[in-house]
Image (cartoon, rainbow, N blue to C red):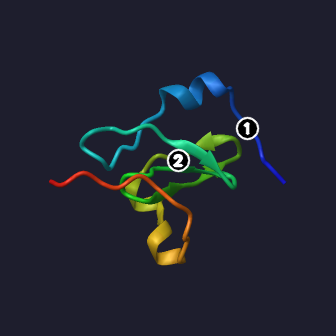
Amino acid sequence: MKMNPPFPMELLEMLACPACEERPPLRWHEGRLVCDRCRRAYPVREGIPVLLPEEASSLADEGNSEPTEEPSAR
C-alpha cells in the first residue's frame, strides 16, 4: 500500500537533506523522508518532517536493499 505524505507535494519538492553538503532532495518512502545520497531516513511526526540528522535512522543499518543513487566521491 502506497502512503502519501501528510503534507503538500510542493513542500516535498523544497525539502533537502540537512546532513549532506550538496543538499540533495528527499523522497517520500514508507512514511519517512529518505536521502538517497547518505541513506538517512527522517521521521515525520504528526505531519511535520523532523529534519534533524540526530533523529534520522540509517537505511544501511536497517538492511534496506532498495536501490539508491551511488554517492559521489568526496
Local crowd size for mark 1, using a 10 Å CA cut-off: few (<14), some (14–19), many (≥20):
few
Number of dots carrying numbers? 2
Report the residue at 78% width, 47% height from top: 3
User: Going from the N terminus, do you reach mark 1 or mark 2 first?
Assistant: 1
Pick the quarter of the image with the C terminus.
bottom left
* Residue 34 horizontal side relative to residue 7, left or right: left
Residue at which label 2 appears: 50
Q: Residue at x 43, y 59 (%)?
A: 39
Residue 66: image location, x then y, percent: 56, 63
Q: Is residue 48 above or below residue 52?
A: above
Given the image, on which type of amino acid does mark 2 rest? Val
Query: Which of the two discs, 1 and 2, sits closer to the camera?
Result: 1
Q: Which mark is residue 57?
A: none
- Which image quarter holds the N terminus? bottom right
Question: Which structural element holds mark 2?
Answer: loop
| Disc 1 from disc 2: Cα separation | 13 Å
Q: Are marks 1 and 2 in contact (CB under 8 Å)?
A: no
Name the kind of residue labelled 1 in the image: Pro
Q: Residue 52 placed where, x, y %?
A: 42, 51
Residue shown at 36% from the left, 44% from the top: 18
Pinpoint residue 55: horizontal percent, then vertical percent: 47, 60
Q: Out of 30 and 50, give the one closest to the viewer.
A: 30
Q: Secondary structure at mark 1?
A: loop
Measured as percent of width and height from the top left, residue 56 is found at 47, 60
Query: Furthest residue to the right?
Result: 1
54 vs 12: above or below: below
Residue 60: image quadrant is bottom left
| Residue at the spot 54% in from the left edge and 75% down from the top edge | 62
Image mark for residue 6: 1
